[in-house]
Structure formats: C-alpha cells, structure tokens
Amino acid sequence: MKTGKRWSSWKLFAAGPILASAIILSASGCAKDRAFIEKNLLAQSADGIEVAKNYRVACPDVIELDIAQRPEFTGRFEITSEGRINLGEYGNPRIQGRTPVEIIKLVAAETGVNETDVRIRISEFRSQHVLLIGEVNGQQRSVPYCGPETVLELLQRAGGITRGAAPDDVYVIRPHVGDNQRPEIFHVDLKACVLDHDHRTNLRILPFDQVFVGETRRSKISKAVPPWVRMIYSKTTTDEHR
C-alpha cells in the first residue's frame, strides 16, 4: 500500500516560513471581510425589551412585580412547579405560559387595581435554553432563552463571533423537543443579514434550538501550523523590516 511522502525535518524547517506566509497572506483578504461583519454585528443593538414582551413564562422563572400603592405585592416571585405565584390573601394565580402583558391583566383582575398600576419584569429566565456551538465569543454554552429573538439578536447578546468564524456557515438546528416532529436544519446567511440588511434567513429562535457557527478553512489550517513555524515567520518578517 502506497503511503504519502514524508518530509525530512530539515525540509520542513526550511519550508516553515513559506508555509506560514502563504497561510497568512491568503487569509488576509477574507479576514478583513469577517472583521467588518463582526464589527457591524455588535454595532447593531438588539431590543431585549421588545423580545421579552412575547416571552411566555414557566417554572422556575422569576418575575418582579410592582403595583402602585400596594407595596405588599412589590417584590420577586419565583414561579412554582404548578406554574403559580403566591399573592397571599388574593390566592395563587396560575401564570404559566402567559406573556408579561397577559400577567398584568391577570394580576390587576385578581387584586382589583387598574392595569396601568401594574408593572412586571422578568428578572431571571430559567426555564428554557438555547445552545451555542462553534465559533462564538466565549465558550460553547447553553444560554437562557429570552423570547423569540432572531439569530442576529442572539449572537449580539452572546457577544458576537470569533475571528475564525465563517459567516456563510451558520445554521440553526431545531430538535423539536417534545412535539413529535422530525428535527429541522436552517441555513442563516449572516453576511446578508449584517451587511445587506437582508433578513430573509434571519430565523427567530425557539426554545432548545441549537445555533452553530462554523470555522473557516484558513482558520483550521492556521491552527494546525506548529508554534515554531509561526515563530520563524515572525522572526523572518522582523528581520526584513530592519
């Protein structure tokens, strides 16, 4: 069985600067585009308040209530396993699955105050999550689901993408947890969303979606270059500029 040629150590040593130089030069053009996308991605602020308006609470989320002239109801309430909050003598209204606007109407009716006197804020999103995979800033991780935000808004909230991210390799995997449907995969054109404001692929996230951001081929190759090769290239370029 034929095997590939193996370079001797001196040949690899001699070719090191050339290899590193080729990788860095070939990546420079695309890197500018990616840097521009990354910068513009974080420059576009997401409206978390608007997203949260459509969030449906569940156990064990935590809400904050403030009712004018009724200080006994001002405070934090954790939603119980039965989907309820404790309002003392006014009972334990069930708020599971309701939006903030719906909760305001319910609390106002239960306590006999005007809806305009009731304020609510979801202070802790605990019940549902979204999984971030791949080239996102920070570690691959699970983040709280805060409502039907778009992929763009989610990436903004998560801190953006890495320098090695591939804007054309972004996908949403929808596992359809608990609804007896087959998993779906959606492609998101991040470049079109950020630079062209074309949001046709800017999918709205559902609970338990998985957002994958791929890595460029050049970034993978660059990581494969041994540290000593990078050192040689760095020393070579320094000597050339003396």
Image (spheres, rainbow, N blue to C red):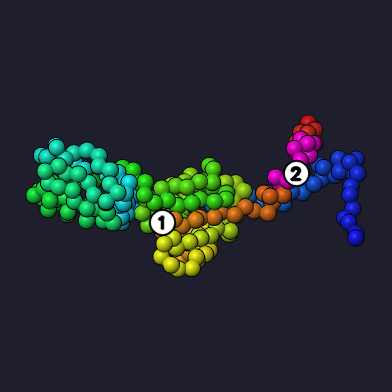
In the image, what residue occupies the spot 72% across and 49% down?
A: 221
Whether residue 8 is visible, yes or no, is yes
User: What secondary structure is found at the residue carrying circle 1?
Assistant: loop
Q: Position of residue 235 (x, y in %)?
A: 78, 33
In the image, what residue occupies the spot 16% across and 40% down?
A: 73
Inspect the image, locate mark 2, and give the three-letter code of the amino acid beneath it.
Val
Residues rendered magenta in the picture: 222-232
Q: Is residue 147 magenta?
A: no
In the image, what residue occupies the spot 76% across and 41% down?
A: 226
Asked if the residue under mark 1 is in contact with the one under mark 2, i.e. CB atoms within 8 Å, the reply is no
Q: Nearer the viewer, residue 139 or 32?
A: 139
Furthest toward the top, the residue is 242
| Residue denoted by label 2 | 225
Inspect the image, locate mark 1, and give the three-letter code of the amino acid beneath it.
Pro
Q: Which numbered tag is attached to residue 207?
A: 1
Query: Quadrant of residue 74 in the image?
Result: top left
Alpha-carbon distance for marks 2 and 1?
A: 39 Å
Q: Is residue 230 magenta?
A: yes
